[in-house]
Amino acid sequence: EAQVTQNPRYLITVTGKKLTVTCSQNMNHEYMSWYRQDPGLGLRQIYYSMNVEVTDKGDVPEGYKVSRKEKRNFPLILESPSPNQTSLYFCASSLSSGNTIYFGEGSWLTVV
Amino acid sequence: RKEVEQDPGPFNVPEGATVAFNCTYSNSASQSFFWYRQDCRKEPKLLMSVYSSGNEDGRFTAQLNRASQYISLLIRDSKLSDSATYLCVVNFYSGGYQKVTFGTGTKLQVIP
């Protein structure tokens, strides 16, 4: 089954404790991205990757890092999480620019 | 002006009604357009792409007006199961750069 898988789905962590949210897609998609969704603000892009070893900042990259060492994986790293990073995070992928975007089920992150 | 704007609603309509949503975008060079549906606390899922000539999928019709820079979604014979938030997506890409922008969504509640 074609899908985007992200883990963990739910996480409560403390300020400053590094965490990684993994994302994997099995559709051989070139394009992957991370979004956060907050009430009233909609989906905002954090980082995106056009292909392996090619990443770029989205609209709200501060406090996040990403890497794209393999085509299928695109982890999101919070080196020192802060409470304002409490949000619902979605990983997404598409075949290439302009194509349909497929989302993972989302990761609820709470930083206390 | 926001890059992509939608009326947040909510639109409360009776079953069987016809409802229309608009979405305006600011980048006249945008190239592809989509409507996504998002159920509460779930990931967005593609409802339909929007083509220049307009397109229909069952009870759903999408249209693009490049001159006025808006896309629209028409839902006929509304069902209870249509209750969700509808997100418009505007995509611009050129060379190694891509900009995907989501609207904040329009909430639809279909009432028995």
Image: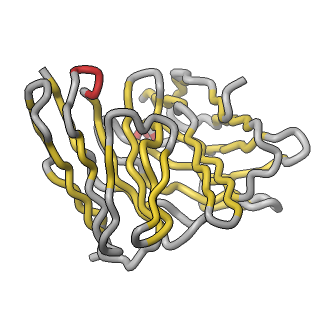
Quarter of the image for residue A88 reads: top left
The vertical placement of B70 against B106, above or below, is below
Q: In the drawing, does residue A6 fall left or right of residue B8?
A: left
Residue nearest the viewer, comparing B37 with A50: A50
* Residue B43 placement (x, y as % from top left): 34, 47
The vertical placement of B95 against A110, above or below, is below
Query: For the point 50% across and 44% down, which residue is it?
Result: A58
* Residue A95 placement (x, y as % from top left): 49, 73
Q: Give the number of marks.
A: 0
* Residue B18 placement (x, y as % from top left): 64, 37
Residue nearest the viewer, comparing B109 with B90: B90
Q: In the drawing, does residue B85 fall left or right of residue B42?
A: right
The vertical placement of B96 against A21, above or below, is below
Query: For the point 53% across and 33% down, which residue is it?
Result: B105
Q: Quadrant of the C terminus of chain A?
A: top left
Query: For the point 40% across and 68% down, which residue is it?
Result: A53
The outermost residue toward the right is: B67
Query: For the point 14% across and 43% down, which residue is it?
Result: A19
* Residue B9 placement (x, y as % from top left): 55, 21
Quarter of the image for residue B42 reads: top left
Q: In the drawing, does residue B74 fall left or right of residue B41?
A: right
Residue nearest the viewer, comparing B108 with A46: A46
Q: In the drawing, does residue B3 fall left or right of residue B15?
A: right
Q: Quadrant of the N terminus of chain A?
A: bottom left
